[in-house]
Amino acid sequence: MRMALIGFAVGAACLQQQAALPPPLAMALASAVLLVTIAAALRFAPRLPPALGVAAGMLAGAVFGFLWAAWLAQRALAPQLALADEGRDLRIVGTVDNLPYRFSQGLRFNFAVERADAVVPPRIVLSWYAGRANEMPPDVRPGERWRLTVRLQRPHGNANPYGFDYEAWLLEQGVRATGYVRVARDNRRLERFVFSLGNTVEHCRALLRDRILAALPGKPYAGVIVALVVGDQRGIDQADWQVFNRTGIGHLISISGLHITMVAGLFAWAAFTLWRRSFFTRAQLPLLLPAQKVAALAGAGVALLYVLLAGFGVPAQRTLYMLMVVAAALWLNRLTSISHVLCTALGVVVLIDPWAVLWPGFWLSFGAVAIILYATVGRTTPLAHHAAPGTPHVPVPPSRRERLVHALRVGVNTQYVVTFGLVPITMLLFGQVSVVSPLANAVAIPLISLVVTPLALVGSMLPRLLAMPVLGGAHALVDALALCLQWFSAMRYAVWSAPVPPFWLFCWAMFGTIWLLAPRGWPVRWLGLATWIPLLAAEPSHPAPGRMTVTAFDVGQGMALLIETSGHRLLYDTGPAYTPETNAGNRVLLPYLRARGISALDGMVISHSDTDHSGGALSLLDGVPTGWVLSSLPGRHAIAQAARQHLHCATGQHWTWDGVRFEVLHPQAASYADAKLKANARSCTLKVTAGSKSILLAGDIEAGQEAELARHGGLQADVLLAPHHGSGTSSTPAFLLAVRPQAAIFQVGHRNRYHHPKPEVYQRYGAAHIARYRTDQAGALTLEFDETIRISAYRDAHSRYWQSR
């Protein structure tokens, strides 16, 4: 049974790697064959060798998992917004069915559609932005029914290596369209609350969040308290997340399995004690129902309520299902092993949500529990009772000191097991591992789990007068913990980074880890550490001398390209700012650099000051050491002030790295004296040549600057980054004739409001027989410059069935 459940999860994971779903007829035939095979296996199971039976069970589970995930995927993809309805005003009526998130520019929420002017998917995501006078939208609460005028589009997200898959996340949430609320007179609330179980849960979460924020106005870590009570992590600053992740305690800043187990155990103990004493009456309740069963029921019920408040995340689900399996076994008077409980929880999670296998939390959650079971079950020496002196048959309970020492020993061993056991998984998922994690967790786990979380839960339910000191105390402890974590995070070697390993190297390191954590007596267990050497000591890949690789990222409406030679790396532009808190730097570029193991940049070029080119620069300068910044920005600009060394780009500048030549073609140095010149006209234009092949990066120059460059000559390049994203004011025929590119890259956002690239400009490139690549359609592009130029698109190389094409 356990192997069948593991196979079920493996099959679902295999389905999530497919570029297309299997046809319905093929699924029906496979289901029929599977049923016949299972029936035959059950008929002849007693005659099969044990190993063959285990393999057959795992194979049957994998096939069933694959088919089950495919069936759910087909159902989830069925609701679809018509292409003709994208971008046009639609009137819809429905209810707010999640906890709205309010940010500096407006708010965002899920909306359950009840009726609309057109065929609209039943669940969508809406953003409601502030008005022209910075007038914030009205307060929107879960469960309210609204009539709204909206503009919608099909799900679409940026597609980059090692990036977050927004389209997969929307599919898992059952969201099949996104959009925003239009300004309209008939936008209004129709009902204050529409009753349903989901709306009731979300309404309670909103009330608790409001109570916490009201009791902690303006407090820096109020978002952490909210996350611990209702699982809403969106109010935590990015800078705080960086500290939490660098110190390895990010798993605690949410409603984790540890917190749920603690709260469920507390209520189970209370129910057991009260029932055993019949609530201090003479009712003799244990004669009617054993106290153990009452405790199991109370613990499982409280866990369910807490998980509902948590938003039903994977770690919370895993803990809930494990507790429910244990409670069911107790009620049915059945004995069960911990491995059976864990595998059952695994099967239930994947059965309900087959897309859970796509996210790191799934693998970290189940991996941590599995490695703890492997390294501790059957090996932990129980705390023995001692015989009283002179009375060898009368046991004496251990003293408080002995119990404390035993608990500390178990805790230290568990932390050791988790720290070492998760190293390969963490490197595979993130390309880095926190070195200070054991120390940080030794401080944070008891403080967060035993003190802060109970205070936060109690404080969120008390009247405001009593809630303020209780929540204030919890916040003060988090504040003190944050200071300690910042000190840990600032250590030079707080985090060990290396490139994300290939899967075979991960398997090799995982084998060594299992060897390392084997039972005592296993030969030379320390040799398991040797398998980590290629994992932790790997170097980032790089092109050969004289060659280069260019990565054009899919950052939406903006520009960002990484140019790599054999020994140097240069970033040209840094993409847009999405919100005041998020940008292409911290959402796209930094995750890519960390996953590649790139710990520093030799240089950065910021073509000009427009935020779609410079929006991610400050995040990058803060996250990655950068040698120098070359830009057309004024010296007082924040980016220029943050750079180690800042220089103005000017015609004539050039340098050579590893046989690759870099030349600045624009602007003229004298242009900086012209205060009336637009930022676009002063875009740093860079030509990079490797051998006989070259690329021209033209920023946002327009027709006037193109004509000036054409007069000076030397523009010919094999690849052209389309100036100004293919706007109607650039890419003139004369300029294209002077450059004569074989291929052109358009870095544009999906359905961007500027309508870039302009149709006539895009056709102009096609008429000139220039191969055209759009990041909104192809995702990130990788260009390898050798004797030839090889261009690969991320959406082609990593195609998935849910992706928008």
Image: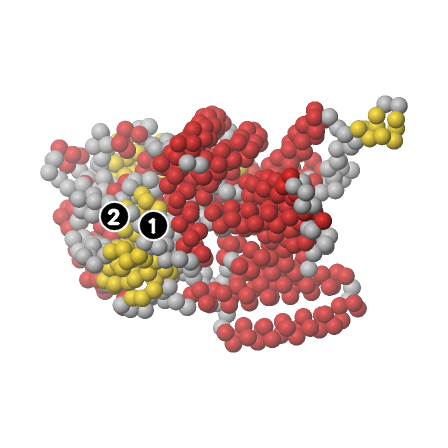
Left/right placement of residue 714 relative to residue 80 reads left
Looking at the rendered image, the quarter that the N terminus falls into is bottom right
- At label 1, counting other C-alpha atoms closer than 10 Å, the crowd grade (few under 14, some 14-19, many 20 or more) is many
**Badge 2 local density, few (<14 within 10 Å), some, or many (20+)?**
some
Whether residue 284 sits left or right of residue 425 in the image: it is right
Residue at screen point 80% across, 28% down: 396
Marks 1 and 2, how far apart at CA: 12 Å
Q: Which mark is residue 662?
A: none
**One can see residue 217 in this view:** yes
Q: Nearer the viewer, residue 140 or 314?
A: 140
Relative image position of residue 503 (x, y in whole percent):
56, 50
Picture layout, residue 344 above or below residue 230: below
Residue drawn at 76 percent across, 71 percent down: 44
Label 1 SS: loop
Which residue is disc 2 drawn over? 137
Which residue type does callout 1 highlight? Arg
In front of the other: 292 or 278: 278
Amino acid found under the numbered disc labelled 2: Pro
Residue visible at 34% across and 33% down in the picture: 217
